[in-house]
Image (cartoon, coloured by chain):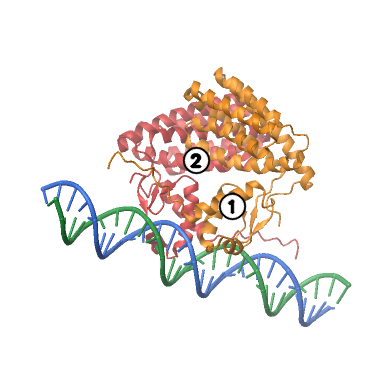
Chain colours: A orange, B red, C green, D blue
Amino acid sequence: MDNFIFPELKQRTVEDEITSRLRNAIIGGSFAPGSHLNETEVAKQMNVSRIPIREAIKKLEQEGLLVRHTNRRVFVVSFSAHDVKEVFSMRANLECMAFEWALPNMGQADYEALRELIAQQKTAIASEDYESLARLDMQFHEFIVSKADHSRLLKSWYEQHAQSQMLLNVRFRKMSDYTPETVVRDHIQILEAIKRNDIDAAKLLTLQISERVALECSQTLEEFLGTGDPEGGE
Amino acid sequence: MDNFIFPELKQRTVEDEITSRLRNAIIGGSFAPGSHLNETEVAKQMNVSRIPIREAIKKLEQEGLLVRHTNRRVFVVSFSAHDVKEVFSMRANLECMAFEWALPNMGQADYEALRELIAQQKTAIASEDYESLARLDMQFHEFIVSKADHSRLLKSWYEQHAQSQMLLNVRFRKMSDYTPETVVRDHIQILEAIKRNDIDAAKLLTLQISERVALECSQTLEEFLGTGDPEGGE
DNA sequence: GTATTGTATACTGTATACAGTATACAATAT
DNA sequence: ATATTGTATACTGTATACAGTATACAATAC
């Protein structure tokens, strides 16, 4: 029974489960930025002890989604205008670095995969399924960053992405003058640059897009929250 | 009694203390890369319960210094040749980004501070105090990255720096053909570029230095460990 | 009425205790 | 002798219990 290979069982501990539930809730906007978490309450709701909750919280704190003040409560991160700049500039910078590492690893099959993602994005827009669009948008960038085969780069990117997702969710909810077609147009341009192996063009596009989105985000945030106060408003 | 301001008391929790002790021990090389940690044992040694130990471990795991396998032990990270490339490329990339953000914030006083650090480095070399030299080396770069006023950039940089420090410590112990004067020479060149406000030159220097150090590191590691096996060798 | 201090409550931080899983080694069968 | 299985041990994962700190509000003094 050697060629009878089962796929490896990835043990999902309680903490892992809690972490992703909490993370999804935060990114998805179930908790408002700046609101606080009660460990006991969360533990009660999920019917587990506080320990795995605390460990999950610690992880999300490291990821920049939660802020803990010793002996005070845990807060969902809230973004000042400066934070918005930080998140998007980091993301853009990491993606630029990713191009350098990823492009030499990419071939025809990868271009196809990206093209397919763009096609699905068009479908999502047509059916006004913006949740899928957001997911597909992420997958496009994730694909490229993954191709870099650079675990530390990827980890950092995920963190920035989670935060940018929080910000974009606010934007989606507001829907000010946001046109989803822009996503597709941007991706097509990036894909073209990738195919040409034109790292500089890809970088430039990324930086431009990042700047634009960051601007939109901080405008929306301003309308939303008034002047953005520093993280974890008491 | 209003103008009688005491400096704010920063509460140092048990976990914080443990975290820095463990971190220093790991970076300093008290634990060999790949060796494992026993929570109970560490708890006993420090005379605390396992809970704060676990929280500290979780933090260091996020920082990339420890690797945990579910229900198995916790291992001190060990570096493959690819990991070395990752660490130094990330660090270099972050420092390049830091130049763009920091240089507009820097003035005469800052140049002075950097010059002073270089002077101290020379003293350290003269007295063959390589521990101080390593610390001063870090402070030089830390100063610049801090000036970027970019918390996410700084956080990520600290993580990469901790790992690169682990690697450099191996190198220091080997002392192959490493000449400490190089540190000073590099820093002088970077400072010159900063003074000229020449971001591109500063970036180029950083990338070159990074590449060189990474190369030295992986060579030393190879001699040290034979072929570097992937992290957390069972 | 306002400002300060005392007290109760609620929450976080840590310790102890138990449950579940992995590892090592002995026992058994072939 | 080798391969496999059973069993003990050790360690991690989680629950419960307690200690320490912050917050809110009442009580007191001015």
Q: Which residue is drawn at 73% across and 43% down?
A: A173
Query: Crowdedness of circle 1 by 10 Å Cα count: few (<14), some, many (20+)?
Result: many
Q: What residue type is labelled 2?
A: His
Q: Do labels 2 and 1 share a chain?
A: no
Residue B125 - label? none
- The secondary element bearing badge 1 is classed as helix
The quarter of the image holding the N terminus of chain B is bottom right
The amino acid type, in three-letter code, at marker 1 is Leu
Q: For this view, does D19 lie left or right of residue A77?
A: left
* Disc 1: host chain: A
Q: What element carries label 2?
A: helix
In the foreground, B144 or C22: C22
Disc count in the image? 2
Residue identified by numbered label 1 = A22
Q: Nearer the viewer, mark 2 or mark 1?
A: 1
Left/right placement of residue A27 relative to residue B207 reads right
Q: Mark 2 points at which residue?
A: B161
Rounded to the nearest angstrom, the CA distance separating label 2 from label 1 is 30 Å
Q: Where is residue B39 in the image (x, y as percent from the top left)?
A: 40, 58
Residue C3 against residue A150 in the figure, above or below: below
Residue B110, percent across and down? 63, 37
**Horizontal and vertical percent position of residue A79:** 69, 46
